[in-house]
Image (cartoon, rainbow, N blue to C red):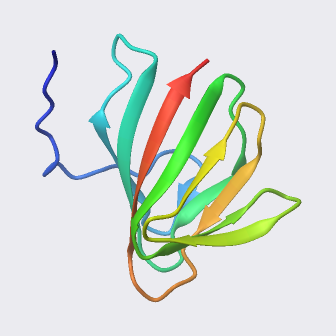
Amino acid sequence: MKVWKNGDTAGITPPNHFGGLTVLDVVPFSGSNFSVQVSKAPKGGGGELHHHDDWSQVFYMISGEMTFDTGKERFKLSAGQAVLFEPHDPHYTINEADEESTYLVITVKQ
């Protein structure tokens, strides 16, 4: 068993993210094949179009909404909704709403 108690720690803005989006490692990869992060994005915050070669990611919206763009499809998710991106699935995110969004990103390394 492992316990993490870093929920009150300030997050960081990872490379290729913008507009004040922050990411906090709640359960870091360290020694495992998955992680759980809490992301917060103010209006205009998001991540550039990219994909992962060997990661699957679930984005689960806690509050607010985020717009996702795959290059072929554009859609919004709000609280209680989720999306799964498999390896090589391109994704771009942006908060186009007036309120901050908060969501979990669960990443599993294939």
Asked if residue 42 is positioned above or below residue 85 in the image, the reply reads below
In this picture, residue 35 sits left or right of residue 95: left
Image height check: is 28 above or below 20? above
| Residue 41, horizontal then vertical, whole percent | 43, 67
Query: Where residue 34 appears, x then y in whole percent?
Result: 44, 24
Give the camera-side residue of 40 and 61.
Answer: 61
Q: Quadrant of the N terminus?
A: top left
Residue 89, quarter of picture: top right
Residue 37 relative to residue 65: left or right: left
**Most distant residue in the top direction:** 31
Report the residue at 78% width, 34% height from top.
Answer: 88
Residue shown at the point (47%, 46%) measured from the top left: 14
Q: Position of residue 9 (x, y in %)?
A: 16, 48
Q: Residue at x 52, y 51 (%)?
A: 59
- Residue appearing at x 54%, y 44% in the figure: 58
Q: Nearer the viewer, residue 11 or 53?
A: 53
Asked if residue 52 is positioned above or below residue 16 in the image, the reply reads above
Q: Is residue 65 above or below residue 89?
A: below
Mark count: 0
Coordinates of residue 42 in the picture (x, y in percent): 42, 75
Q: Quadrant of the C terminus?
A: top right
- Would residue 40 appear left or right of 83 to someone viewing this image? left
Residue located farthest toward the bottom when viewing the structure as drawn: 98
Q: Residue furthest right?
A: 72
